[in-house]
Image (cartoon, rainbow, N blue to C red):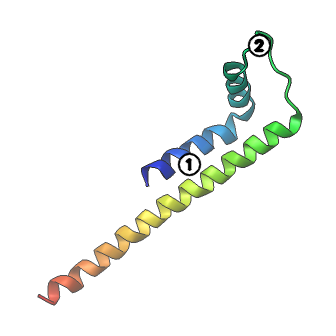
Amino acid sequence: MVLRTLLGLFGVVEFVFTRRLVDGAMAWASAEPDPVELEPWVYTVARLEGLVFMVWGLRAWRGASRLARRGREAAPVAAESR
């Protein structure tokens, strides 16, 4: 649950700041002192990846709230059966 939430938050950052994040990651990973030229499709794929992470994180959050709601609904029934 926590991992999915963190990946969802990372997806938001990746979706909003795609170019800055990808350029920073490539500068950090590259051994060359000069900046690396990337194809334009790299940014599109990174933005799609961010979108997938956001949806995945949102589904985890919605699933947890749904489970919590079920737990609250089931609690009075369990108390009455005792």
User: In percent of the image, x 50 and y 52: which residue is there?
Assistant: 4
Element under label 1? helix
Q: Position of residue 39 (x, y in %)?
A: 88, 33
User: In percent of the image, x 61 and y 51: which residue is there?
Assistant: 54
Can you identify the residue that label 1 sits on?
A: 8
Which quadrant holds residue 21? top right
Q: Is residue 69 left or right of residue 59?
A: left
User: In percent of the image, x 71 and y 19: which residue is there?
Assistant: 27
Q: Residue furthest top?
A: 33
Identify the amino acid type marked 1.
Gly
Q: Is residue 55 left or right of residue 66?
A: right
Q: First in sequence: mark 1 or mark 2?
A: 1
Element under label 2? loop
Alpha carbons under labels 1 and 2: distance apart:
32 Å
Q: Nearer the viewer, mark 1 or mark 2?
A: 2
**Vertical comparison of 39 with 7: above or below:** above
Q: Quadrant of the C terminus?
A: bottom left
Q: Position of residue 18 (x, y in %)?
A: 72, 35
Can you identify the residue that label 2 sits on?
A: 32
Mark 2 Cα shell of 10 Å, populated few (<14), some (14-19), many (≥20): few
**Vertical comparison of 28 with 3: above or below:** above
Q: Position of residue 35 (x, y in %)?
A: 80, 16
Q: Nearer the viewer, residue 80 or 38?
A: 38
Mark 1 Cα shell of 10 Å, populated few (<14), some (14-19), many (≥20): many
Q: Which mark is residue 63?
A: none
Q: Position of residue 43 (x, y in %)?
A: 79, 37
Identify the amino acid type marked 2.
Glu
**Vertical comparison of 1 with 82: above or below:** above
